[in-house]
Image (tube, rainbow, N blue to C red):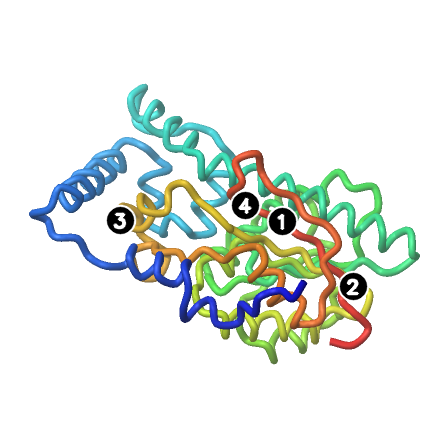
């Protein structure tokens, strides 16, 4: 059976139309407009008491700083009420899915390293948009075979500083480094040395609706990762809180609304395959929100 061509799913189709609808402003005189205005006001009040909500307002609810806070999962706030609000925030279905995604990334990263070790190949790990890098560093902490190198990159100077401090804290400065880098600059990714044998892109493409940007990034990864090397990538084919996110939460991009376009798993896998990778495994959380996939670079990409 011929599979549908999803190259233009960012320009037409169900997920394109859905994202346009979510980005469309609502009249404050409408019931839905009033509801979401009240929700945004409640989030502002919550930010006065909850450390997690306050951090989201300050850095973006999709930022590396927010995700690192979600991973740590320790309710923090002003007094008992602040901690209760923060606990409720951390227990949101989306954040629970994010923490499960972290476990799946760690599992498949160790799986890829096991294969490389079994093949007596060098293990060079690169994450192109690592946030604070916690999921990579914690996956490697207890791993019995230390990689030859770990390169973490991120566009945000704040994330680079925080990630470098985490490398020092975990005693990995001998093999790991954190540098500024644009995950959508194909030439920059292709020029990385040493050549990574395991590339990681987690939680990034979900934030950008246009497929051309994702193609550039994947082309850079295909040029960087040597044949036989691995790629870990994430997807978000569904989310139960898309409207809440779009109407009430702000992104890391100058406080703009956080409007996401879902990519079906078929669309994401097609982009990865076109770049020169062959998918071999996938994990998904129990709610069906976040996927983590493992692919291997073909001999010619």
- The residues tagged by marks 1 and 3 sit, at their Cα atoms, a distance apart of 27 Å
Q: Name the residue under label 1.
A: 292
Q: Report helix, strand or loop for mark 1.
A: strand
Quarter holding residue 257: bottom left
Residue 105 x/y as whole percent? 65, 46
Q: Which of marks 1 and 3 is nearer the N terminus?
A: 3
- The residues tagged by marks 2 and 4 sit, at their Cα atoms, a distance apart of 23 Å
In which quadrant is the C terminus drawn? bottom right
Mark nearest the camera among 2 and 3 is: 3
Q: Report helix, strand or loop for mark 4.
A: loop
Question: From this viewpoint, which residue is outermost toward the top?
Answer: 80
Binning the other alpha carbons within 10 Å of mark 1 as few (below 14), some (14 to 19) or many (20 upward) gives: many
Q: Earlier in the sequence, mark 2 or mark 3?
A: 2
Q: Name the residue under label 3.
A: 247
Q: Which residue is drawn at 62% across and 64% down?
A: 3
Q: Are marks 1 and 4 in contact (CB under 8 Å)?
A: yes
Q: Earlier in the sequence, mark 2 or mark 4?
A: 2
- The residues tagged by marks 4 and 3 sit, at their Cα atoms, a distance apart of 21 Å
Q: Name the residue under label 2.
A: 229
Query: In the image shown, does 148 or 116 lie closer to the viewer?
Result: 116
Instruction: Please tell me the numbered disc located at residue 290.
Output: 4
Q: Which of marks 2 and 1 is nearer the N terminus?
A: 2
């Amino acid at each position: 059976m011929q599979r549908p061509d999803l190259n233009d799913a960012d320009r037409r189709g169900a997920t394109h139309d859905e994202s346009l609808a979510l980005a469309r402003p609502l009249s404050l005189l409408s019931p839905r407009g009033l509801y979401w205005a009240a929700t945004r006001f409640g989030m502002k009040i919550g930010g006065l008491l909850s450390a997690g909500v306050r951090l989201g307002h300050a850095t973006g609810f999709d930022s590396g700083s927010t995700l690192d806070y979600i991973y740590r999962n320790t309710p923090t706030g002003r007094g008992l009420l602040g901690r209760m609000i923060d606990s409720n925030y951390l227990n949101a279905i989306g954040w629970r899915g994010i923490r499960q995604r972290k476990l799946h990334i760690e599992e498949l990263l160790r799986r890829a390293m096991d294969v490389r070790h079994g093949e007596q190949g060098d293990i060079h790990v690169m994450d192109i948009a690592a946030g604070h890098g916690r999921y990579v560093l914690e996956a490697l902490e207890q791993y019995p075979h230390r990689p030859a190198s770990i390169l973490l990159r991120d566009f945000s100077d704040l994330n680079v500083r925080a990630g470098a401090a985490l490398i020092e804290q975990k005693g990995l400065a001998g093999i790991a480094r954190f540098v500024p880098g644009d995950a959508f600059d194909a030439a920059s990714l292709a020029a990385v040395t040493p050549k990574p044998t395991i590339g990681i892109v987690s939680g990034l493409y979900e934030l950008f609706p246009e497929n051309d940007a994702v193609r550039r990034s994947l082309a850079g990864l295909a040029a960087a990762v040597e044949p036989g090397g691995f790629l870990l990538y994430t997807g978000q084919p569904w989310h139960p809180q898309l409207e809440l996110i779009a109407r009430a939460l702000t992104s890391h991009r100058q406080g703009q609304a956080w409007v996401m376009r879902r990519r079906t798993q078929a669309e994401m896998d097609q982009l990865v395959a076109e770049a020169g990778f062959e998918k071999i495994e996938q994990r998904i959380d129990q709610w069906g929100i976040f996927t983590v996939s493992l692919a291997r670079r073909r001999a010619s990409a």
